[in-house]
Image (tube, rainbow, N blue to C red):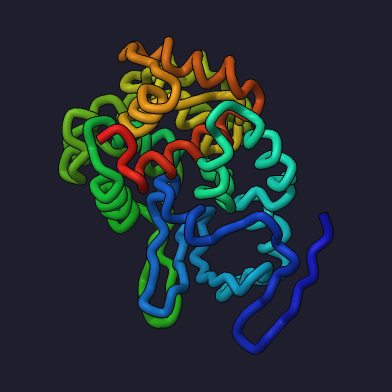
Amino acid sequence: MDFDYIKNLSSITVKPVSDFSLQKTLECGQCFRATKGRDGRFIIVAMNKVIELEQNGDSIVFYNSTVEDIQQIWLNYFDFYSDYGSIYKKIMTFDKMKDIVDFSYGIHVLRQDLLEMITSFVLSCRNSISGVSKTINLLCENYGNPLEYNGVKYFTFPEVNVLRQLSVSELEKLKFGYRAKYLYEVYNNYDDDYCLGNITREVLLSFPGVGNKVADCVMLHSGISKAVFPVDIWISRGLRTLYGCTSSDYAKQSKIGTEMFGELSGYAEILLFYYARENKLGV
């Protein structure tokens, strides 16, 4: 897919971007470090950068970025190279999915930093999205590298060599709670090659604090695999309401999704999650 890059004094506009909603993508629960300003723009701290974005139809306006960074980082991060129009059309053909796709249309599955996703989803156990965001931001403020944009200071996600130096007690001070001991082990057993995508679900499951749900979430939201179907309370309610699934067993629930959607499981999951959460499905 080819894009046009229109340089302005303080921004770069990228177009055409089809089948994409910036707001839904950043507010659907997959991104823990995106904030929305009063002007409707979003600020994201990711991939060792801070950028500001807004959407105007099929155009995405990037602030505090370069054409080189957009091409090398952000097109991949937002998964703009995938044909979501075709993906949505295929998912619509599955039982009871047309209304869900129509409602959630425009959500892209972000390709986020692997270690940040492991940290975020380990912290998500028995935690809210806002709670995870606060803890991740606290970690970054204390041990990340500073960035400045429009007079405001932001912080990158810490480098792995910095995280390896932290003790369990230091992680506990950052509100990691009982998860501190898990992530301490993760950081000290993390292979630098993992960030290149050289990691399997089995390796993830070998980390303390990483069960089936966390492993599936990490695989999906770090861009390793779209053939997984993570199950949380909203997906569970959706499966029960739409497909009559009464089992509370994670493996059985996830299998329903993967058997139904196959290689499109991850895409379908995030659409269903957003639909179920926004419509309070099954509550």
Q: Is residue 149 above or below residue 81?
A: below
Q: Is residue 69 above or below residue 135?
A: below
Quarter occupied by the N terminus: bottom right
Q: Is residue 229 above or below residue 250?
A: below
User: Can you give x and y, in whole percent of width and height, for residue 117 in the image?
Assistant: 44, 38
Residue drawn at point x = 62 percent, y = 80 percent = 11
User: Can you give x and y, in whole percent of width and height, for residue 67 in the image?
Assistant: 72, 69
Which residue occupies the extreme right position in the image?
2
Residue drawn at point x = 34 percent, y = 53 percent = 140
In the depicted view, which residue is nearer to us: 281 or 190? 281
User: Can you give x and y, in whole percent of width and height, for residue 220 in the image?
Assistant: 53, 33
Note whether residue 64 is visible: yes
In the depicted view, which residue is nearer to us: 251 or 114? 251
Q: Quadrant of residue 197?
A: top right
Q: Is residue 229 above or below residue 142?
A: above
Q: Quadrant of residue 245?
A: top left
Residue drawn at point x = 51 percent, y = 71 percent = 52
In the depicted view, which residue is nearer to us: 229 or 280? 280
User: Can you give x and y, in whole percent of width and height, for residue 91 in the image?
Assistant: 64, 34
Q: Quadrant of residue 121?
A: top left
Residue drawn at point x = 36 percent, y = 22 percent = 240
Note whether residue 73 is visible: no
In the depicted view, which residue is nearer to us: 161 or 16? 16
